[in-house]
Image (cartoon, rainbow, N blue to C red):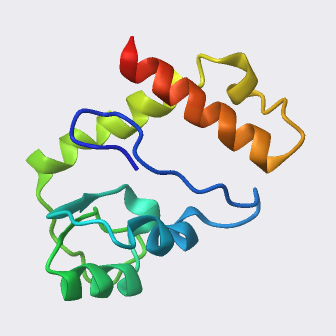
Amino acid sequence: MVDALGYLTRFILLPGQRHDSVGVEPLIEDVDFDALIADKAFDNNALRKGLNERGSLAVIPSKADRKTSIPHDVEMYKWRHLVENCIQRLKEWRRIATRYDKTDTSFGAFVHLSAAMRAIA
């Protein structure tokens, strides 16, 4: 999760074989926001229902296999590039891009360290 300036605010490590949408609920827990901008992979009814109950806008394009397409704010969706930019900057550290660390704890710590270094640079 990144803020409006593209800085990393939270992240959750998931096993490689798990879908990313599984980690959304714990990631957004106790966070106040007006809109969630995500790509098509996060287009599911459960997430949309949860966001609606919170009073947050779901800016998520519909997957191609959805029977009825759900409209989204195209102009707001353009800001999703901040997430991609943040990930690319983190992957500039070879250690993160190739995941050299053997444990989740050390990998997570290095992600925090590199995000903090980017924030002060």
At which x and y percent is residue 120?
A: 38, 17
Residue 88 in view of the camera:
no
Q: Nearer the viewer, residue 92 or 40?
A: 92
At which x and y percent is residue 103?
A: 86, 45
At which x and y percent is residue 93?
A: 64, 18
At which x and y percent is residue 66?
A: 37, 79
Examine the image and state in which quarter residue 14 appears: bottom right
Q: Nearer the viewer, residue 121 or 90?
A: 121
Kindly identify the residue that appears in the image at 38 percent across and 67 percent down: 28
Examine the image and state in which quarter residue 57 appears: bottom left
Kindly identify the residue that appears in the image at 35 percent across and 34 percent down: 7
**16 above or below 45?**
above
Kindly identify the residue that appears in the image at 71 percent across and 18 percent down: 94
Q: Nearer the viewer, residue 81 or 110?
A: 110
Kindly identify the residue that appears in the image at 75 percent across and 60 percent down: 15
Q: Is residue 22 left or right of residue 85?
A: right
**44 above or below 5?**
below
Q: Is residue 44 left or right of residue 97?
A: left
Task: Point out the image quarter for the C terminus.
Answer: top left
Q: Is residue 28 left or right of residue 89?
A: left
